[in-house]
Image (cartoon, rainbow, N blue to C red):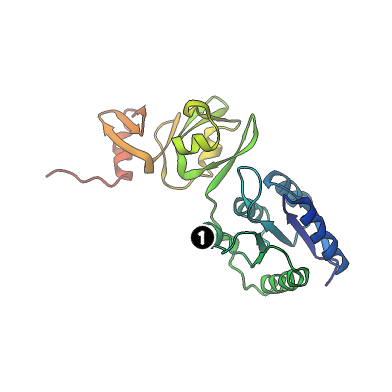
Amino acid sequence: MSTAINILIVENDILLATNIKLSLEKEGIGIAGIASNLENAVELMKRCDVDLALIDIELDGPEDGIITASELVRIKWIPIIYITGNTPLVIGDRIKRTFPAAFLQKPIRMKELQVQIEIALHNFNEGNLPSPSKIETEHIFLPTVNGLVSVKINEILYVKAERINAQLFLTQTESKRLHQNNGSAVLAFVNKGRIASRLPSQFFELSRSFLVNLSHVTRIDGATLYLQAHSIPIPDGRRKALLERLTVVKNS
């Protein structure tokens, strides 16, 4: 296989990653680098010419291999081969949305890995893998005091403008996952408008200050909108537009 091919290895087991690297290099396959988490993988993806990513599904940290794959293909559309130690392998919707080229079960058989890489690249170059436009991500990555933080989009209740920054108020489940104290908001070092441009149509701009997730609206009482335990004032002139975005059953 040509040395022009470069593989990115995303694996937190450094011994396994090194063994894969050495084995592939013996076969003339180039290695773009080894990453142990999403942040390192994204850095390598932006810096190096990567043709295929080999990703362990079970990575350390809040972002697993599936999230990592989703972010990598947003940077460059490449084939993904997953590694997993789970038996039996459960292929859920999250995995399917990344359109993997192959799966490999641990322990890795190096000859099989080489064959799967060759097949994946062949299918990719022949146009037999779906286009990147079909890739959807469940998360948004935001710059915070703790670096880039992965937030589940569907778990965002609303976004509040905070001058040049923005506060994201989350469900209790997501707050716990991110270890937010007492359900406190996540402060993102980016303005509300930039965040709004990356969110799906279920988010509604209630005002210049508030962007709300209509999926979490629990009640509308007069000029007040309720999202779970949170209440937000509805500005004059925005109630009609809000109701038009919701499925409302009117009394006769």
Query: Quick check: can you spot residue 79?
Result: no
The answer to which quarter of the image holds residue 218 is: top left
For the view shown, which residue lies furthest in the top direction? Answer: 163
Q: Is residue 77 above or below residue 159?
A: below
Vertical placement of 187 versus 47: above or below? Answer: above
For label 1, the crowd category at 10 Å Cα-Cα, with few meaning under 14, some 14 to 19 and many 20 or more, is few
Q: Nearer the viewer, residue 224 or 106?
A: 106
Relative image position of residue 66 (x, y in whole percent): 60, 54
Q: Where does the image place residue 78, in percent across and percent down from the top left? A: 68, 62
Residue in the image at 60% along x and 59% along y: 86
Q: Quadrant of the N terminus?
A: bottom right
Residue 29: x percent and y percent?
Answer: 83, 66
- The reply, left or right, for residue 212 in relation to residue 163 is left
Q: How many marks?
A: 1
Q: Classify the position of the C terminus by image quarter.
A: top left
Up/down of 225 relative to 8, above or below: above
Give how far across and how far down residue 180 sits, in percent: 53, 30
Q: Is residue 16 above or below residue 61?
A: below
Residue beneath label 1, please?
A: 92
Q: Nearer the viewer, residue 195 or 108?
A: 108
Residue at x-position 25% and y-position 29%: 222
Which residue type carries mark 1? Gly
SS category of the residue bearing label 1: loop
Residue 196 visible in image: yes
The foreground one among 110 and 241 is 110
Residue furthest left as drawn: 252
Q: Is residue 2 left or right of residue 216?
A: right
